[in-house]
Image: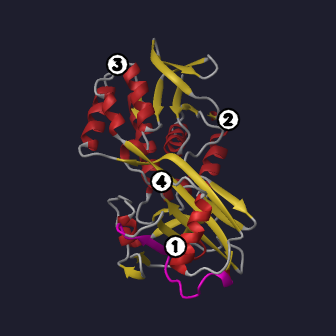
Amino acid sequence: MTVAVVGAGLAGLSAAWELTRAGADAVVLEAERRAGGVVLTEQRDGFIVEGGPDGFLTAEPDIQELAREIGIGDRLVGQVARGSTMWTGRTLEPIAEGKAAELLGIQSTAPLQAGFTSFAAGMQEIVDALVARLGPRVRTTQGVSGMAPAPRGWRLSLTGSSSLEAQAVVLAVPAWIAARLLVGVGVPGARALEDVVYHPSITVSLAYRVDQVPAKLEGTGFVAASDASGAVGACTYAWRKYSKRAPDGFALLRAFVTAVDEDPGAIAHNELTAILGLAGPPLWTRAFHWWRGLPRYHGGHAQRVAAVRERLTRLAPLAIAGAGFDGAGVSACVKSGGEAARVILNRLGR
């Protein structure tokens, strides 16, 4: 009997990989046309352009262990530049190692000072490798609109008026989607998962010639002080943070922009010109909009999730995983997906 994994972000793909390794017949159902969720890398004119996270905390082991399991451990690359600055509204001032990540809301039990790690060709590498290893088990444009108990597990209602019966299910979807599906099968307290607030995120990558960017720039980038005016809340010097993110003689910046009505690329360039002293227009810009990109938890979140998980033990095998529950970082998603898979395997006696 099939184990259905709903959602093909890193949590869902990691769950499916763990299930498959244990001999379970896993199928991944993804509503979108592509797997990976907010993990998205584009290659453009020799630049490596990240649409979502550009890396993960080096001190977090889960995603690195997964990379080695699926044969891409040699593609891991460490952070090259070190240190960050804060834009006060007037000047760029050095800040302590790890402080920028803390100010940006990156939460982890691992030390932030250890820096970040990525993949040589961008974060998409781990998504592509997982999809390749899972093969036809990953079904895109195949969303789940509802679920109901079945004699041998669950019956999932799929887009296109079809259905799938599964012995067990992993819901690796945003919290508000999981809440709707769980409320539909009568899980007490599931509506509390809707308390997770997903904030919009806009990132803009901007390409320049190196001679357009002041040579005095140091570190991996800057974060703006809370009282600094402007739409740019932070900027990564992407071509310095990791090697080979831009061709020789070129520079790549990545700005994090608040929600704006006008062209975010133009706004980012204008503000970065004033802050960094750029010379001339960018060669190109690429904006990525994630309208529900960054989950943030209210107090008592862990207790609410634990209460829901305890209630799931009274049903046919069913688990939840992902950034909406166990931490928003990519390594946290890998860990969450793996743990959900092990819950299912234990329930199935595997």
Q: Earlier in the sequence, mark 2 or mark 1?
A: 1
Give the crowd class for mark 3: few <14, some 14-19, many >=20 residues within 10 Å: few
Q: Earlier in the sequence, mark 3 or mark 2?
A: 2
Q: Position of residue 90 (x, y in %)?
A: 42, 80
Q: How is the image coloured?
A: secondary structure
Give the crowd class for mark 1: few <14, some 14-19, many >=20 residues within 10 Å: some
Q: Position of residue 256 (x, y in %)?
A: 51, 62
Q: Where on the picture, by quarter, is residue 175?
A: top left
- Residue 136 numbered tag: 2
Is residue 272 positioned above or below 147 on the image? below
Circle 3 residue? 186
- Residue 330 numbered tag: 4
**In the image, is 49 to the left or to the right of 271?**
right
Q: Is residue 86 magenta?
A: no
Distance, label 4 to label 1, CA atoms, is: 16 Å
Q: Where on the picture, by quarter, is residue 151?
A: top left
Camera-side mark, 2 or 4: 4
Is residue 277 positioned above or below 262 on the image? below
Circle 1 residue? 79
- Residue 48 numbered tag: none
Q: What is the magenta range?
A: 211-227
Amino acid on which disc 2 is placed: Pro
Amino acid on which disc 1 is placed: Gln
Q: Secondary structure at mark 2?
A: helix
Q: Front-most of 94 and 40?
A: 94
Residue placed at 63% from the left, 56% from the top? Answer: 41
Give the crowd class for mark 4: few <14, some 14-19, many >=20 residues within 10 Å: many
Distance, label 2 to label 1, CA atoms, is: 34 Å
Q: Secondary structure at mark 4?
A: helix
Distance, label 3 to label 2, CA atoms, is: 32 Å
Q: Position of residue 211 (x, y in %)?
A: 67, 84
